[in-house]
Image (spheres, helix red, strand yellow):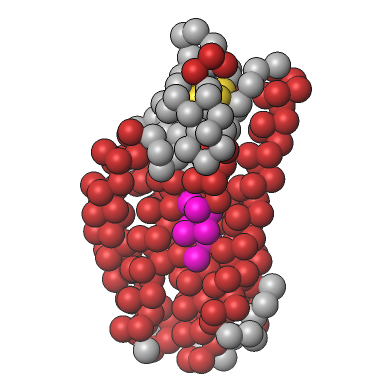
Amino acid sequence: MLLELLISLIIGATLIGIGVHFIPVGGAPAALSTSAGIPTGAPMITVGMGITGILAASSVIGQSDLIMVLYGAVGSMIMISVTMFFSNIIHVFGVGVPLASSNFEKDPLTGFNQEGYVSPGTTGHGIPTISFVSGLIGAFLGGVGGSLAFSSIYIVLSNNLQYSLVVNVTIATIFSLLLFFIVAVMASYNIGGTIQGFYDEKFRKKILPGTVSCFLISVILSIIYVFVIWGLIYG
């Protein structure tokens, strides 16, 4: 039981860390329309994504594990897609800049030639199609990871403790959100600023060390979690 929980937490936390690297984040430069990506930091947008996914997963408690994980993934994807969509609306109709990136001459999905639309002195603005799709992939991975952690913790608690449904859900939510936040911060430190998705050259350089570091921190956190939950059950 606890071994299964440990494995699930490690897989879930590692998926969260990998997913963060896919999300196009521009930070302050994106807020000033000088870089493509979501105008916020990776930890903030990832934790928001995690909260949405876990809430979606908790809405189908009683269903199979697969349904809970898929609901979490879809919830996270909806949150990210809405965020990116309205970010693009503000950039296009508010700031008056086209959706373009200097990281690739043509959008790999649409074939749109972006070179002439990137403002001088910037690396792009808004969230181009390829970056939008990358964000959805990252949200899917993060949503699967977060809801897998949530469902694993909830199932162990509900099977071994006499707490009420609300208490079990609350504990599982707090634990999985803490996991989300810690791994997201680790991944964002590895990214080190802005990233425009999986087609970004920076992604190719960062994804392997990022995956390894997220896996290692996931192992440490998962072991701590298992000891804490073991204490709740047998303490």
Count up the numbered dots: 0
Which of the 4 image quadrants contains residue 9?
bottom left
Residue 76 visible here: yes
Query: Residue 128's spot in the image, x, y percent?
Result: 56, 33
Q: Main secondary structure of the magenta part?
A: helix
Residue ranking furthest to the right: 93
Looking at the picture, does residue 106 appear above or below residue 21? Answer: above
Q: Residue furthest top?
A: 120
Identify the residue shown where x is 57% and y is 16%. Answer: 117
**In the image shown, does 209 or 197 lie closer to the viewer?**
197
> To which quarter of the image does residue 126 belong?
top right
Query: In the image, is residue 14 above or below residue 157?
Result: above
Relative to 150, residue 122 above or below? above
Tell me which residue sits at (34%, 46%) in the image. 186
Residue located at (52% from left, 41% from top): 109
Whole-percent x, y for residue 11 in the image: 36, 68
140 in the magenta segment: yes
Is residue 209 found inside the magenta-colored segment of the image? no
Relative image position of residue 178 (x, y in whole percent): 46, 58
Residue found at x 60% / y 26%: 99
The magenta segment: 137-144
x, y percentage for residue 215?
28, 59
Residue 39 can be seen in this image: no
